[in-house]
Image (cartoon, rainbow, N blue to C red):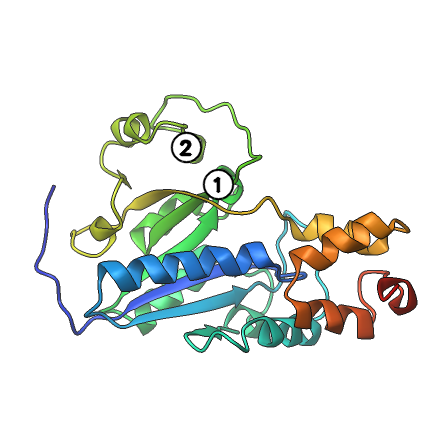
C-alpha cells in the first residue's frame, strides 16, 4: 500500500451528518467514539469533530424546523467542548447533496484530512445517493455497524454499497484497496479509504423515538427518554414536538 509521510500541520476533520430529528444518544456515541479513536491514534494531530444537520433527505420525511433541530443539537453538545455544529447544509438552497457538501469542504480545507462518518444502513444505500460512490474522491468514509441491520451482500466490486460483509477480510478483498482495517490508513495513505469499524452503535433510530413520543404507552415514553440526552428530552417536552403532549410525557 502506498504511504506518504504524515504532515502534522494538517487537521483531521470529522463530520457526522443526519437530520438529527431528534438527535439521540446513538448519534453522540458514534461521533464520540470516532473522535476518541482518532485522538488516541493521532495524539499530535488536531481533531475537529462536527455534527452536520441536513436540510432534509429525499429518502426521508420532511424534518422539524432548522431552529428546533439546532436548539436540540446545542443542548445535546453543551457538555462536549470538542464538538461543534456545522450549519453549512442548512444555508444551502435545496436539494442539498453530500457530494456537493464535501466538494465544498475539500475546497475549503484543501490540506486537511476529511472523514465522513455514517452508519452501516446509510452506507448500504450509497447507490441511491447523488454521486454517492464519488464521495471517495473527496473524503474518507468511516462506517459503523448497526447491530440490527441485516443485508444480503453480493460479492461484486461493481456494487460498492452492498459490500459491507460481516467478515472484514472478505470486504477488503472484494473492494481491492478501498476498504481498510485500520484507521491509520485514513491519514497516512495517498488515497481515500472506507474504514469498517466493528464498534456497534446502539439500536436507536430517530423515527422510532418520534413514534414512541406519539404513543399513549408509558413504556414507550420511557424508551424515548432513555434514548435521548436529558436536555433534549426536556426541550421536546416543553415545546412539545413530534405530536407528544407535555402533560403525558412528564407522567
Give the residue displayed 40% in from the left and 68% down from the top. 49
Q: Which residue is mark 1?
A: 120
Question: Above or below — where is 245 with respect to 26?
Answer: below
Give the residue displayed 44% in from the left and 36% down from the top. 161
Q: Residues within 10 Å of mark 2 (few under 14, many from 20)?
A: many
Residue 137 located left or right of residue 214: left
Q: CA distance from mark 1 to mark 2?
A: 8 Å
Residue 197 on image: x %, y %: 37, 43
Which mark is first along the chain, 2 or 1? 1
Q: Secondary structure at mark 2?
A: loop
Question: Above or below — where is 51 with respect to 210?
Answer: below
Residue 201 on image: x %, y %: 51, 47
Does any portion of residue 97 appear in the rendered image?
no
Residue 42 located left or right of residue 209: left
Question: In which image quadrant can residue 82 be found?
Answer: bottom left
Q: Secondary structure at mark 1?
A: helix
Question: Above or below — where is 79 with respect to 24?
Answer: below
Q: Mark 1 near mark 2, Cβ–Cβ under 8 Å? A: yes
Give the residue displayed 10% in from the left and 45% down from the top. 2
Quarter of the figure that contains the C terminus:
bottom right
Residue 171 on image: x %, y %: 32, 30
The label shown at residue 55 is: none
Residue 90 on image: x %, y %: 58, 71
Question: How many labels were placed on the picture?
Answer: 2
Question: In which image quadrant can residue 66 be found?
Answer: bottom right
Residue found farthest to the left: 5
Question: Above or below — where is 167 with respect to 31?
Answer: above
Q: Residues within 10 Å of mark 1 (few under 14, many from 20)?
A: many
Give the residue displayed 40% in from the left and 28% down from the top. 165
Residue 232 located left or right of residue 164: right
Question: In which image quadrant can residue 234 be found?
Answer: bottom right
Q: Which residue is mark 2?
A: 164
Amino acid at each position: 500500500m502506498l504511504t506518504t509521510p504524515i504532515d502534522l500541520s494538517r487537521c483531521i476533520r470529522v463530520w457526522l451528518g443526519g437530520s438529527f430529528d431528534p438527535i439521540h444518544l446513538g448519534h453522540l456515541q458514534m461521533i464520540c467514539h470516532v473522535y476518541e479513536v482518532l485522538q488516541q491514534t493521532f495524539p499530535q494531530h488536531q481533531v475537529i469533530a462536527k455534527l452536520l444537520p441536513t436540510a432534509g433527505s429525499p429518502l426521508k420525511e420532511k424534518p422539524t424546523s432548522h431552529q428546533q433541530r439546532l436548539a436540540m443539537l446545542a443542548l445535546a453538545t453543551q457538555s462536549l467542548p470538542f464538538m461543534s455544529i456545522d450549519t453549512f447544509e442548512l444555508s444551502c438552497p435545496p436539494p442539498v447533496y453530500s457530494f456537493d457538501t464535501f466538494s465544498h469542504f475539500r475546497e475549503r480545507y484543501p490540506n486537511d484530512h476529511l472523514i465522513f462518518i455514517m452508519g452501516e444502513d446509510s452506507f448500504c444505500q450509497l447507490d441511491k445517493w447523488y454521486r454517492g460512490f464519488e464521495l471517495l474522491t473527496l473524503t474518507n468514509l468511516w462506517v459503523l455497524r448497526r447491530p440490527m441491520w441485516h443485508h444480503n451482500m453480493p460479492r461484486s466490486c461493481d456494487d460498492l454499497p452492498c459490500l459491507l460483509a460481516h467478515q472484514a477480510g472478505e470486504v477488503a478483498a472484494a473492494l481491492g484497496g478501498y476498504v481498510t482495517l485500520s484507521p491509520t490508513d485514513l491519514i497516512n495513505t495517498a488515497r481515500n479509504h472506507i474504514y469498517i469499524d466493528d464498534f456497534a452503535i446502539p439500536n436507536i433510530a430517530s423515527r422510532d423515538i418520534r413514534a414512541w413520543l406519539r404513543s399513549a404507552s408509558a413504556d414507550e415514553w420511557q424508551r424515548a427518554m432513555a434514548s435521548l440526552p436529558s436536555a433534549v428530552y426536556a426541550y421536546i417536552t416543553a415545546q412539545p414536538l413530534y405530536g407528544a403532549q407535555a402533560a403525558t410525557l412528564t407522567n
